[in-house]
Image (cartoon, rainbow, N blue to C red):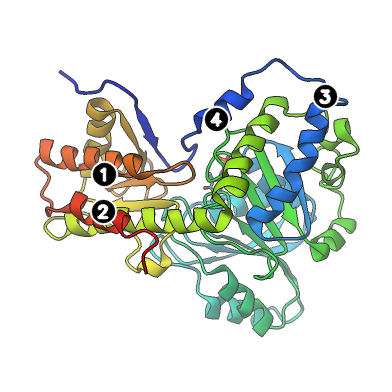
Amino acid sequence: MSLNFGRSLMAIPGPSVIPERVLNAMHRPSPNIYEGELVDLTATLYPDLRKVAAMSGDVAIYIANGHGAWEASLKNTLAAGDRILVLTTGRFAANWGLMAESLDIDVQVLDFGMQGDADPDQLEAALRADVDGKIRAVLTVQTDTASSVLNNVPALRKAMDAAGHDALYMVDCIACLGCDRFAMDEWGVDVMVAACQKGLMTPAGLSFVYFNDKASRARKKVNPGFYWDWLPRTRPELFYQQFGGTAPTHHLYGLREALDILVHEEGVEAAWARHDTIAHAYWAAVDAWGADGALHHNIADPDKRSRSVSTITTAIGDADRIRQWTEQQAGVTLGIGLGFGEPGSEEWNRRFRIGHMGHQNVPMVMGVLGAIDCALKALSIPHGSGALDAAAAVLAGHGKV
Ligand SMILES: *Cc1c(COP(=O)(O)O)cnc(C)c1O
């Protein structure tokens, strides 16, 4: 017997929930890709994509997932034999570094483990030690989707400046653009990669490489090849070449609708504030459960937690049971404990993740929390009481000082 009936809910950290309006905007026949409505609509995307990242430079759109943007960012700025420094705080910067290795880039890693953020002092020391300036780029993520840590992007920039180092600063915001506060120009980020299927609420298939003048100068010294070259992709007048071939027709309509919602209706600042409150509601519930039992936050310090995803630790095996119960009995799909030990190991199976990125509101938050609360009770997993009350109190306080 199952209670799994009615509308199901994805609460994994990407792909996120797609608004009906975005799906409806995509439900149409193929448009003319050479002139007319789609060409005009595509030109309107760029200013809004810049607003989401608070930047004034260029943005290239790829028909790809986040991995495509990773590869594009590397191919447009680096060549085989160049050295980079990767700041690892979970799984994702590490994988970006592995991709660089596959391009014969020389990868140096500073590993901060699965429970903390990248330390600006260690970055500064590593850059000071690079006396002949061999390091061409520093790579990090803003949110690591495995550990759910939030790196301090401006503090890391300050460390680079303090070291007087000239490396490019490249940041992956795939998990949190539109959720965690980000200001590319002000924070001195040279290259930023993002994708459409998380905070940007569009089905997977578009990704973005943002870059400034300094990165453009680096592009002139390398050969990115035909398909990943970011130059044609910043020139809407080259419509067919702009996408290296046929445009991602329906995704462009979907993204237009999503940016209408995010930039023109809600506003990016308001979306950040909403994600902040929603994250705090989840955290308050986890604190309440953890008051009596094994559940706790993977990232202990709230200032270092992402507003788009939460990684929660349980007693061995419980995370897996909770995920299976919520999916099978309640229609709520939670994220797996990615990146801790080997897949399927004890460490892996004692973590689950909640994605709270993009199209999120009160009933979704309370629904996910309610389903987890039911799972804890059904599975007799020890937990403190009052989690839903605690979350409701946080949500009720939204916008009040
Ligand atoms: C999801 C994610 C990626 C990978 O994106 P894909 O679209 O799956 O290729 C990379 N980095 C971060 C931080 C992510 O959250």
Asked if labels 1 and 2 touch by Cβ distance under 8 angstroms, the answer is yes
In the displayed structure, would residue 168 be above or below residue 257?
below
Local crowd size for mark 2, using a 10 Å CA cut-off: few (<14), some (14–19), many (≥20): many
- Identify which amino acid the numbered label 2 is placed on: Ala
Residue 128 percent coordinates (x, y):
66, 83
Circle 4 sits on which residue? 21
User: Which SS class for mark 2?
Assistant: helix
Label 3 CB sits under 8 Å from any ligand 1 atom? no
Tell me where residue 27 sits by quadrant. top right
Decide which of 110, 205 is in the foreground and name it: 205
Report whether 341 appears left or right of 29: left
- Measure how far apart labels 4 and 3 are at the Cα level: 22 Å
- Measure how far apart labels 2 and 3 are at the Cα level: 47 Å
Mark with earlier residue (2, 1): 1
Mark with earlier residue (3, 1): 3
Judged by depth in the image, the label closer to the viewer, 4 or 3, is: 4
Q: Quadrant of ligand 1?
A: top right
Please tell me which residue is depicted at 22% across the width and 32% down the height of the picture.
325
Mark with earlier residue (2, 3): 3
Task: Give the residue at the far top of this rendering.
Answer: 29
User: Which SS class for mark 3?
Assistant: loop
Circle 2 sits on which residue? 391
Quarter of the picture containing the C terminus is: bottom left
- Measure how far apart labels 2 and 1 are at the Cα level: 8 Å
- Identify which amino acid the numbered label 1 is placed on: Leu
Asked if labels 2 and 4 touch by Cβ distance under 8 angstroms, the answer is no
